[in-house]
Image: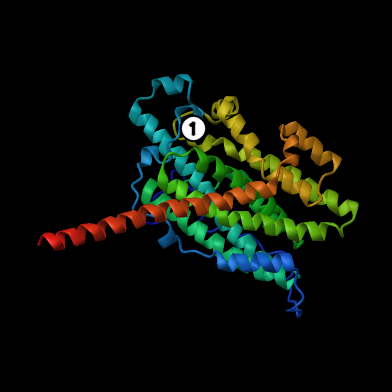
């Protein structure tokens, strides 16, 4: 079924065209790369995988409880609207929320694919071009997987949130080659990792858990790539140039924070926009969710050298300043380990099933 037949709201024109900015850069130096980045490129090649094969698409998903979301996690919980809903309506609300969340993941992954391709085109260093080429393939795989989950398991898609679209547009329109790194690798990918991780660690459903764990294993490399490249480059910039990037980060963080309310979902249940915004803002779960979402961004921004007073004050205002001391390397290592552990558990079960089948066949042969 065409995606346009599944949209919960009108997505507008079928193509969003963002004018290209900046120069395409060729490098004639092919053998003078940074060892850390070339090692990451090798890892990117080694870790390629097929979403058709690694994920068990045969697992059943109830579209009205796709994630095992607790009632308390929905903004309407505890309101008069919730009290008036029957079980069927609450199931439909869960379906809309799951669709909205994974739709934003899907649109973000397409944005990441385009930004990675832009980095291949515009970054001056060949080692960075090599790695970003592997990331472009990763992001294509992620978009494929999220799209399949929405089409086959949820049966509903939401348009891109206007704040996510605004940040993507700002990132792609900027002619400076480092901005796709900063907008995508640090801000959008960092926030997505935290969102993926929260659902991965709380869902009771095996298929979305697999999808998120495997995608996060790739994303851990992507954030590491952005950190390496920008940390090196930002050491060369003037204070004025650094402040320009910090202003971009501040604006982007506010946009990303404000995109997470899911107001579009509540509007589809007949709640006026202004009231939907108030309900979302009062949600204790959303407030916790917001704080956790910056657990990957704040330490990364600090690590690459963007830590001026105005940026620090913005993080104080958001209530996430203390996250600058988080151990980002530990978080990324855990993301990789969780995916490997999930693989091991799945293959162990499959191996036991194969052994049981062989033993049963032998026993049947003996009896005959």
Observer able to see residue 165: no
Which residue does the image show at 79% across and 51% down from the upper left? 245
Image location (x, y in percent) of residue 287? 61, 30
**In which quarter of the view is residue 92 placed?**
top left
Q: Is residue 344 left or right of residue 277?
A: left
Which residue does the image show at 39% across and 57% down from the upper left? 2
Observer able to see residue 204: yes
Q: Is residue 100 left or right of residue 294?
A: left
Image location (x, y in percent) of residue 82? 44, 23
Give the camera-side residue of 179 and 166.
179
Q: Is residue 30 left or right of residue 280?
A: right
How was this image coloured? Answer: rainbow
Image location (x, y in percent) of residue 107? 54, 52
Residue identifier under label 1: 266
What element does badge 1 sit on?
A: helix
Q: Vertically, is 315 above or below 156?
A: above
Which residue does the image show at 48% across and 24% down from the upper left? 77
Give the camera-side residue of 274 and 211.
211
Q: Quadrant of the N terminus?
A: bottom left
**In which quarter of the view is residue 285 placed?**
top right
Q: Is residue 289 left or right of residue 87?
A: right
Q: Residue furthest left?
A: 368
Image location (x, y in percent) of residue 165? 61, 49
């Amino acid at each position: 079924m065409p995606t346009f037949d599944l949209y919960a709201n009108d997505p507008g024109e079928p193509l969003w065209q963002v004018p290209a900015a900046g120069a395409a850069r060729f490098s004639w130096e092919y053998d003078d790369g940074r060892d850390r980045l070339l090692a990451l490129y090798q890892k990117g090649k080694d870790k390629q995988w097929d979403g058709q094969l690694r994920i068990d698409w045969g697992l059943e998903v109830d579209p009205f409880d796709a994630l095992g979301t607790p009632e308390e996690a929905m903004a309407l919980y505890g309101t008069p609207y919730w009290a008036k809903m029957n079980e069927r309506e609450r199931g439909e609300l869960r379906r809309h929320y799951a669709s909205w969340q994974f739709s934003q993941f899907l649109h973000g992954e397409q944005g990441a694919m385009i930004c990675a391709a832009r980095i291949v085109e515009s970054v001056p260093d060949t080692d960075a071009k090599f790695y970003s080429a592997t990331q472009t393939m990763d992001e294509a795989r992620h978009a494929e997987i999220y799209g399949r989950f929405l089409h086959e398991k949820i049966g509903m898609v939401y348009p891109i949130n206007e704040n996510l679209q605004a940040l993507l547009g700002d990132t792609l329109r900027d002619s400076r080659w480092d901005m796709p790194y900063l907008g995508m690798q640090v801000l959008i990918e960092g926030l997505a990792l935290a969102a993926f991780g929260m659902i991965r660690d709380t869902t009771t459903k095996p298929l979305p858990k697999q999808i998120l764990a495997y995608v996060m294993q790739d994303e851990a490399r992507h954030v590491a790539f952005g950190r390496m490249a920008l940390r090196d480059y930002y050491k060369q910039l003037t204070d004025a140039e650094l402040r320009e990037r910090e202003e971009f980060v501040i604006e982007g963080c506010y946009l990303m924070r404000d995109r997470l309310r899911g107001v579009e979902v509540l509007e589809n249940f007949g709640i006026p926009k202004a009231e939907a915004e108030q309900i979302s803002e009062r949600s204790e779960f959303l407030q916790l969710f917001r704080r956790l979402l910056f657990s990957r961004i704040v330490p990364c921004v600090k690590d690459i050298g963007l830590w001026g007073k105005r940026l620090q004050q913005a993080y104080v205002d958001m209530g996430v300043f203390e996250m600058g001391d988080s151990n980002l390397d530990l978080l990324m290592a855990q993301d990789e380990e969780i995916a490997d552990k999930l693989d091991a558990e799945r293959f162990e079960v499959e191996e036991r099933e194969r052994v049981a089948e062989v033993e049963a066949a032998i026993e049947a042969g003996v009896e005959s």
